[in-house]
Amino acid sequence: MTRILIVDDDRTMVLALSVRLRSAGLEVLTCQSAHEASHIALHERPDVLLLDVDMPHFTGLELHECLRLTERGRLLPVIYVSGSVSPSDRQIAFRQGAKAFIRKPFDPQTLIDTIHSVLDERCADSPV
């Protein structure tokens, strides 16, 4: 089963995303801090990371940068789901290897389609 790690400091957003993704047949892991997310991302082996930009203490961009320092983290596809509209945040996210950047509020089906697209791309890139 596909495992999605949701990292967002907004409890309501985490709950809404969790319910929607579970109803789409995805396994969901959640956390509300970048510190906790780094541990989960490296040890629980999610297939995709959904990441907010603006979080206290350690931003999603900083977390993504740190994850890229590890082999496992470099291979983890990241989709940003954020209310941040800063062009510089988007640029940094894609420069770090983000697969998509979805602005809040968003259409849940678009998010699910994006996740499947990223997973399909990952499978196509895997050696046989």
Image (spheres, rainbow, N blue to C red):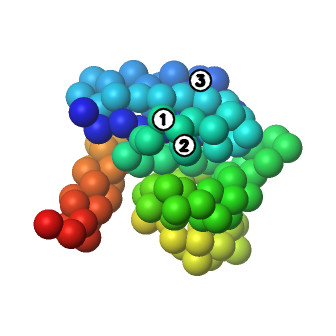
Extreme residue toward the left, this view = 128
Q: Amino acid at mark 2?
A: Ala
Depicted 7 relative to depicted 92: above or below: above
3D distance between C-alphas at marks 3 and 2: 21 Å
Circle 1 sits on which residue?
44
Q: Amino acid at mark 1?
A: Glu
Q: Position of residue 107 (x, y in %)?
A: 38, 44
Does dot 3 land on a helix, a strand or a loop?
A: helix
Q: Amino acid at mark 3?
A: Thr
Q: Position of residue 82 (x, y in %)?
A: 59, 50
Does dot 1 land on a helix, a strand or a loop?
A: loop
Figure quadrant of the C terminus: bottom left
Q: Earlier in the sequence, mark 3 or mark 1?
A: 3
3D distance between C-alphas at marks 1 and 2: 6 Å
| Cβ–Cβ under 8 Å for marks 3 and 2 | no
In the image, which disc is placed on residue 12?
3
Any part of residue 40 in sight: yes
Circle 2 sits on which residue?
41
Q: Position of residue 110 (x, y in %)?
A: 32, 49
- 54 left or right, relative to 108: right
Number of marks: 3
Extreme residue toward the right, this view = 57
Does dot 2 land on a helix, a strand or a loop?
A: helix
Depicted 117 relative to depicted 1: above or below: below
| Cβ–Cβ under 8 Å for marks 1 and 2 | yes
